[in-house]
Image (cartoon, rainbow, N blue to C red):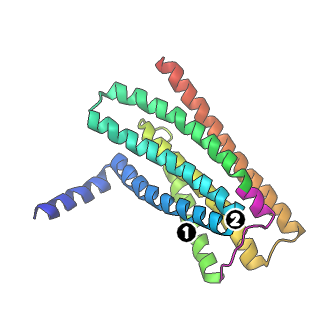
Amino acid sequence: MKDEERAGKLINKIKNDYVFRAFVFSALSFFATAVFTFYNAFLGIAYKSIWNIGIAVYYALLLCIRAYVIFSERAFYKKKLPYDQKEAARKRLFLVQSAFLFAIDLALIAPITLMVQQKKVIQYTTIPAIATAAYTTYKIIISTKNIIKTRKGRHLSVRILKTVNFVDALVSVLTLQYTLIITFGGGMDSDTFALCAVSSFGIWSLLIALSTVSLLQAVKMRKNTN
Protein backbone atom coordinates (compact mmCIF):
# COMPACT_ATOMS: atom_id res chain seq x y z
CA MET A 1 0.00 0.00 0.00
CA LYS A 2 2.87 2.34 0.79
CA ASP A 3 4.39 1.78 -2.64
CA GLU A 4 1.04 2.59 -4.26
CA GLU A 5 0.71 5.76 -2.19
CA ARG A 6 4.22 6.85 -3.13
CA ALA A 7 3.51 6.16 -6.79
CA GLY A 8 0.27 8.14 -6.55
CA LYS A 9 2.03 11.09 -4.90
CA LEU A 10 4.76 11.00 -7.53
CA ILE A 11 2.23 11.02 -10.38
CA ASN A 12 0.32 13.90 -8.79
CA LYS A 13 3.50 15.87 -8.30
CA ILE A 14 4.48 15.34 -11.93
CA LYS A 15 1.03 16.52 -13.03
CA ASN A 16 0.81 19.58 -10.77
CA ASP A 17 4.41 20.74 -10.26
CA TYR A 18 5.78 22.19 -13.52
CA VAL A 19 9.35 22.54 -12.22
CA PHE A 20 9.45 18.97 -10.92
CA ARG A 21 7.95 17.70 -14.19
CA ALA A 22 10.60 19.57 -16.17
CA PHE A 23 13.39 17.86 -14.22
CA VAL A 24 11.80 14.41 -14.51
CA PHE A 25 11.54 14.64 -18.29
CA SER A 26 15.00 16.18 -18.52
CA ALA A 27 16.39 13.21 -16.60
CA LEU A 28 14.73 10.88 -19.14
CA SER A 29 16.18 12.98 -21.98
CA PHE A 30 19.58 12.70 -20.31
CA PHE A 31 19.55 8.90 -20.59
CA ALA A 32 18.22 8.99 -24.17
CA THR A 33 20.97 11.46 -25.13
CA ALA A 34 23.57 9.20 -23.49
CA VAL A 35 22.42 6.30 -25.68
CA PHE A 36 22.64 8.43 -28.85
CA THR A 37 26.09 9.68 -27.82
CA PHE A 38 27.62 6.25 -27.32
CA TYR A 39 25.81 4.77 -30.33
CA ASN A 40 27.13 7.43 -32.71
CA ALA A 41 30.58 7.31 -31.14
CA PHE A 42 30.64 3.54 -31.73
CA LEU A 43 29.56 3.94 -35.36
CA GLY A 44 32.08 6.70 -35.90
CA ILE A 45 34.95 4.60 -34.58
CA ALA A 46 33.82 1.31 -36.15
CA TYR A 47 33.16 2.70 -39.63
CA LYS A 48 35.49 5.71 -39.51
CA SER A 49 32.50 7.97 -40.09
CA ILE A 50 33.28 11.65 -39.57
CA TRP A 51 29.57 12.49 -39.50
CA ASN A 52 28.84 10.08 -36.64
CA ILE A 53 31.85 11.35 -34.68
CA GLY A 54 30.70 14.95 -35.17
CA ILE A 55 27.13 14.22 -34.10
CA ALA A 56 28.44 12.22 -31.12
CA VAL A 57 30.33 15.34 -29.98
CA TYR A 58 27.11 17.34 -30.32
CA TYR A 59 25.15 14.81 -28.22
CA ALA A 60 27.98 14.71 -25.66
CA LEU A 61 27.71 18.48 -25.20
CA LEU A 62 23.94 18.21 -24.73
CA LEU A 63 24.63 15.48 -22.20
CA CYS A 64 27.07 17.71 -20.31
CA ILE A 65 24.62 20.61 -20.07
CA ARG A 66 21.74 18.45 -18.85
CA ALA A 67 23.98 16.61 -16.38
CA TYR A 68 25.47 19.86 -15.06
CA VAL A 69 22.05 21.42 -14.44
CA ILE A 70 20.35 18.32 -13.01
CA PHE A 71 23.18 17.38 -10.63
CA SER A 72 23.66 21.01 -9.58
CA GLU A 73 19.98 21.25 -8.63
CA ARG A 74 20.29 17.98 -6.76
CA ALA A 75 23.24 19.41 -4.83
CA PHE A 76 21.22 22.56 -4.00
CA TYR A 77 18.42 20.36 -2.65
CA LYS A 78 20.73 18.18 -0.53
CA LYS A 79 22.58 21.17 0.93
CA LYS A 80 19.25 22.95 1.64
CA LEU A 81 20.67 26.25 0.43
CA PRO A 82 18.71 29.46 1.10
CA TYR A 83 16.75 30.87 -1.85
CA ASP A 84 19.16 33.76 -2.54
CA GLN A 85 22.17 31.42 -2.64
CA LYS A 86 20.32 29.08 -5.01
CA GLU A 87 19.52 31.98 -7.34
CA ALA A 88 23.13 33.16 -7.34
CA ALA A 89 24.29 29.64 -8.17
CA ARG A 90 21.69 29.32 -10.92
CA LYS A 91 22.96 32.53 -12.50
CA ARG A 92 26.40 30.94 -12.69
CA LEU A 93 24.76 27.89 -14.29
CA PHE A 94 23.09 30.17 -16.81
CA LEU A 95 26.47 31.63 -17.79
CA VAL A 96 28.02 28.17 -18.17
CA GLN A 97 25.05 27.07 -20.27
CA SER A 98 25.64 29.97 -22.65
CA ALA A 99 29.25 28.86 -23.16
CA PHE A 100 28.06 25.31 -23.84
CA LEU A 101 25.57 26.59 -26.42
CA PHE A 102 28.36 28.27 -28.37
CA ALA A 103 30.37 25.05 -28.16
CA ILE A 104 27.37 23.17 -29.60
CA ASP A 105 27.12 25.71 -32.44
CA LEU A 106 30.77 25.09 -33.34
CA ALA A 107 30.39 21.31 -33.02
CA LEU A 108 27.51 21.37 -35.52
CA ILE A 109 29.57 22.93 -38.32
CA ALA A 110 31.06 19.60 -39.43
CA PRO A 111 27.81 17.52 -39.37
CA ILE A 112 25.85 20.25 -41.17
CA THR A 113 28.54 20.63 -43.84
CA LEU A 114 28.65 16.86 -44.41
CA MET A 115 24.86 16.70 -44.75
CA VAL A 116 24.80 19.53 -47.29
CA GLN A 117 27.56 17.77 -49.24
CA GLN A 118 25.43 14.59 -49.16
CA LYS A 119 28.04 12.62 -47.21
CA LYS A 120 25.68 11.26 -44.59
CA VAL A 121 24.34 7.83 -45.50
CA ILE A 122 20.52 7.59 -45.32
CA GLN A 123 18.76 4.25 -45.81
CA TYR A 124 15.21 5.11 -44.73
CA THR A 125 12.12 3.75 -46.42
CA THR A 126 8.92 5.79 -46.67
CA ILE A 127 7.33 4.77 -43.35
CA PRO A 128 10.38 5.48 -41.10
CA ALA A 129 10.91 8.81 -42.88
CA ILE A 130 7.28 9.84 -42.28
CA ALA A 131 7.50 8.69 -38.65
CA THR A 132 10.66 10.78 -38.23
CA ALA A 133 8.86 13.78 -39.73
CA ALA A 134 5.91 13.36 -37.36
CA TYR A 135 8.16 13.03 -34.30
CA THR A 136 10.28 16.03 -35.30
CA THR A 137 7.15 18.15 -35.83
CA TYR A 138 5.89 17.17 -32.36
CA LYS A 139 9.31 17.89 -30.89
CA ILE A 140 9.59 21.39 -32.39
CA ILE A 141 6.00 22.32 -31.36
CA ILE A 142 6.47 21.20 -27.75
CA SER A 143 9.95 22.73 -27.36
CA THR A 144 8.78 26.05 -28.88
CA LYS A 145 5.78 26.13 -26.56
CA ASN A 146 7.97 25.38 -23.54
CA ILE A 147 10.67 27.94 -24.33
CA ILE A 148 8.00 30.65 -24.72
CA LYS A 149 6.38 29.54 -21.47
CA THR A 150 9.64 29.65 -19.51
CA ARG A 151 11.13 32.77 -21.09
CA LYS A 152 9.79 34.96 -18.31
CA GLY A 153 9.97 32.25 -15.67
CA ARG A 154 11.99 32.82 -12.54
CA HIS A 155 13.46 29.32 -12.29
CA LEU A 156 16.67 29.66 -14.31
CA SER A 157 17.53 25.96 -14.32
CA VAL A 158 14.20 25.16 -15.98
CA ARG A 159 14.86 27.88 -18.56
CA ILE A 160 18.25 26.34 -19.30
CA LEU A 161 16.79 22.86 -19.80
CA LYS A 162 14.00 24.14 -22.06
CA THR A 163 16.50 26.14 -24.12
CA VAL A 164 18.59 23.00 -24.59
CA ASN A 165 15.47 21.10 -25.70
CA PHE A 166 14.72 23.84 -28.24
CA VAL A 167 18.27 23.65 -29.62
CA ASP A 168 17.93 19.87 -29.89
CA ALA A 169 14.62 20.28 -31.78
CA LEU A 170 16.17 22.71 -34.27
CA VAL A 171 18.98 20.27 -34.98
CA SER A 172 16.36 17.56 -35.54
CA VAL A 173 14.80 19.80 -38.20
CA LEU A 174 18.16 19.91 -39.99
CA THR A 175 18.43 16.13 -39.96
CA LEU A 176 14.80 15.73 -41.05
CA GLN A 177 15.30 18.06 -44.01
CA TYR A 178 18.21 15.98 -45.25
CA THR A 179 16.34 12.71 -44.63
CA LEU A 180 13.32 13.82 -46.66
CA ILE A 181 15.45 15.07 -49.56
CA ILE A 182 17.38 11.81 -49.80
CA THR A 183 14.37 9.51 -49.19
CA PHE A 184 11.78 11.19 -51.40
CA GLY A 185 13.94 13.27 -53.72
CA GLY A 186 16.43 10.56 -54.58
CA GLY A 187 19.37 12.83 -53.85
CA MET A 188 20.31 16.45 -54.36
CA ASP A 189 20.30 18.34 -57.61
CA SER A 190 21.51 21.93 -57.90
CA ASP A 191 18.18 23.38 -56.69
CA THR A 192 17.79 21.15 -53.62
CA PHE A 193 21.48 21.63 -52.81
CA ALA A 194 20.98 25.41 -52.74
CA LEU A 195 17.79 25.03 -50.68
CA CYS A 196 19.47 22.69 -48.19
CA ALA A 197 22.52 24.95 -47.88
CA VAL A 198 20.46 28.13 -47.33
CA SER A 199 18.01 26.55 -44.85
CA SER A 200 20.82 24.83 -42.95
CA PHE A 201 22.72 28.09 -42.66
CA GLY A 202 19.50 29.83 -41.57
CA ILE A 203 18.87 27.35 -38.75
CA TRP A 204 22.52 27.45 -37.69
CA SER A 205 22.33 31.28 -37.64
CA LEU A 206 19.25 31.00 -35.42
CA LEU A 207 21.24 28.80 -33.04
CA ILE A 208 24.02 31.41 -32.96
CA ALA A 209 21.46 34.14 -32.24
CA LEU A 210 19.95 32.06 -29.44
CA SER A 211 23.40 31.50 -27.90
CA THR A 212 24.21 35.22 -28.15
CA VAL A 213 20.95 36.29 -26.49
CA SER A 214 21.47 33.71 -23.76
CA LEU A 215 25.04 34.94 -23.14
CA LEU A 216 23.97 38.59 -22.97
CA GLN A 217 21.20 37.73 -20.50
CA ALA A 218 23.61 35.69 -18.37
CA VAL A 219 26.22 38.49 -18.28
CA LYS A 220 23.55 41.03 -17.39
CA MET A 221 22.29 38.85 -14.54
CA ARG A 222 25.80 38.40 -13.17
CA LYS A 223 26.43 42.16 -13.28
CA ASN A 224 23.19 42.85 -11.46
CA THR A 225 24.06 40.24 -8.85
CA ASN A 226 27.52 41.71 -8.28
Q: Amino acid at mark 1?
A: Tyr
Q: Amino acid at mark 2?
A: Ser
Is the residue marked by circle 1 packed among few (<14), some (14-19), or many (20+) residues within 10 Å?
Answer: some
Of all residues, the one furthest to the left in this rendering is 1
Q: Residue 82 placed where, x, y %?
A: 29, 27
Please give the name of the residue rendered at 73% of the width and 51% of the height, measured from the top-left corner.
Answer: 109
Please give the name of the residue rendered at 55% of the width and 30% of the height, measured from the top-left corner.
Answer: 218
Please give the name of the residue rendered at 63% of the width and 76% of the height, measured from the top-left corner.
Answer: 129
Residue under label 2: 49
Check the image and report above or below for 192 versus 107: below
Residue 162 appears in view: no
Q: Which mark is residue 135?
A: 1
Q: Is residue 119 magenta?
A: yes
Front of the two marks 1 and 2: 2
Q: CB under 8 Å between callouts 1 and 2? A: no
Quadrant in which the N terminus is drawn: bottom left
Disc 1 to disc 2, C-alpha distance: 26 Å
> What main secondary structure does the magenta stretch of the protein show?
loop
Q: Residue 47 placed where, x, y %?
A: 67, 69
Look at the numbered disc 1 and give the secondary structure of its residue: helix
Check the image and report above or below for 98 versus 38: above
Check the image and report above or below for 122 versus 1: below
Residue range in magenta is 111-125
